[in-house]
């Protein structure tokens, strides 16, 4: 990849395809060029542009942790031309990748704090990156809690990792599905994410909350966190929706004077409160 041309992608070979949920897949990608693999680096929270040649590009976060070297992973839902083309691809085929772009979650600043992750549906992938990053540096943090919900049991992604997280003794995992989305053998919670969060009565003392999910989930989750005393500076989220070019040229992701792709996608709730409500 020529670093002189910001639109020239890395060539990435699909090493593995994982079916996560109906219409949702994860690709593990490796660089076709050894020198690209050696110099590539990214931080938790950054995103990229994934391209299918002849079809176009689509924007996703990097879903793997920067602590896991030599590959990256992305998770996507089949929803349009590019993601449908991606969904038809198989291990061994080559796609393009531009990135990494955007800012990162400030894990260095979170040292010594409790971490509370709150995610809904297909929004777990942006959080998976920072979750694994934190778990791979477990000594940096105090309590780690994950609350993850989806519409139905089928819609939960990373089911194999949820099983692994549920068995760990150095963290707490709470899963929930919407009422009616449970199965006969479901052992998790039943209820919407903000409701279950309120039932958990999370402590705001020395705790950072990281929230990612559908807009309606985020809308009703922030007030619950405020109710329990979370300062808006200690609530983080990522706004990866709306982005297109990734480099602040197309203007598709601007909210007021802020470009989500360049100034974000990671923001605190306090920063969001200063933006026009269109985000």
Image: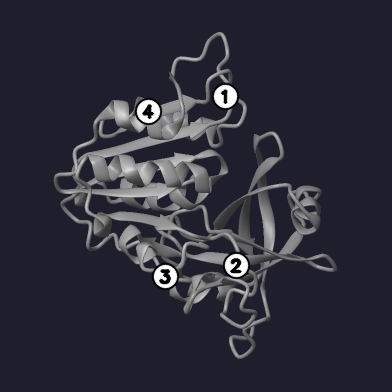
The quarter holding residue 146 reads top left
Name the side, left or right, on which 36 lies relative to 77: left
Q: In the picture, which quadrant includes the N terminus?
A: bottom right
Q: Which of marks 1 and 3 precedes in the sequence?
A: 3
Cα separation between marks 3 and 4: 30 Å
Q: Is residue 263 left or right of residue 81?
A: left
Residue corresponding to mark 1: 153
Question: Which label sits in the foreground, 3 or 4?
Answer: 4
Q: Nearer the viewer, residue 224 or 10?
A: 224
Secondary structure found at label 2: loop
Kindly indicate whether the residue at mark 2 contacts the one at mark 1 (C-beta within 8 angstroms): no
Is there CB contact under 8 Å for labels 1 and 4?
no
Q: Label 2 belongs to which residue?
A: 243
Position of residue 276 measured from the top left corner of the image (x, y, whole percent): 46, 67
Element class at badge 4? helix
Q: Residues within 10 Å of mark 3 (few under 14, many from 20)?
A: many
Q: Residue at x 36, y 25 (%)?
A: 167
Q: Give SS at disc 3.
A: loop
Q: Position of residue 13 (x, y in %)?
A: 69, 60
Residue under label 4: 196
**Residue 231 tag number:** none
Q: Are marks 3 and 2 in contact (CB under 8 Å)?
A: no
In this rendering, the label closer to the viewer, 3 or 2: 2
Q: CA distance from mark 3 to mark 1?
A: 32 Å
- Per the rendering, the mark at residue 103 is 3
């Amino acid at each position: 990849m020529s670093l002189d041309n910001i639109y020239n992608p890395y060539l990435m070979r699909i090493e593995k395809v994982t079916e996560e949920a109906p219409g949702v897949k994860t690709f593990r990608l490796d660089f076709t060029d050894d020198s690209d693999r050696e110099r590539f680096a990214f931080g938790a929270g950054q995103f990229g542009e994934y391209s299918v040649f002849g079809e176009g590009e689509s924007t996703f976060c990097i879903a793997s942790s920067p602590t896991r070297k030599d590959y990256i992973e992305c998770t996507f839902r089949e929803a349009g031309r590019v993601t449908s083309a991606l969904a038809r691809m198989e291990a061994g085929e080559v796609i393009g990748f531009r990135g990494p772009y955007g800012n990162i979650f400030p894990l260095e600043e979170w040292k010594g704090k409790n971490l509370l992750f709150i995610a809904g549906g297909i929004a777990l992938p942006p959080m998976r990156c920072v979750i694994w990053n934190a778990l791979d540096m477990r000594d940096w943090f105090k309590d780690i809690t994950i609350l993850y919900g989806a519409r139905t049991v089928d819609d939960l992604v990373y089911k194999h990792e949820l099983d692994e997280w549920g068995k760990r003794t150095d963290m707490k995992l709470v899963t929930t599905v919407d009422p009616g989305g449970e199965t006969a053998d479901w052992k998790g919670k039943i209820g919407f994410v903000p409701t279950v969060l309120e039932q958990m009565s999370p402590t705001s003392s020395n705790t950072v909350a990281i929230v990612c999910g559908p807009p309606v989930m985020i809308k009703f989750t922030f007030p619950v966190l405020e109710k329990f005393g979370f300062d808006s500076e200690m609530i983080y989220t990522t706004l990866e929706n709306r982005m297109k070019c990734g480099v602040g040229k197309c203007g598709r992701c601007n909210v007021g004077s802020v470009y989500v792709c360049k100034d974000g996608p990671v923001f605190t709730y306090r920063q969001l409160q200063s933006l026009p409500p269109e985000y």
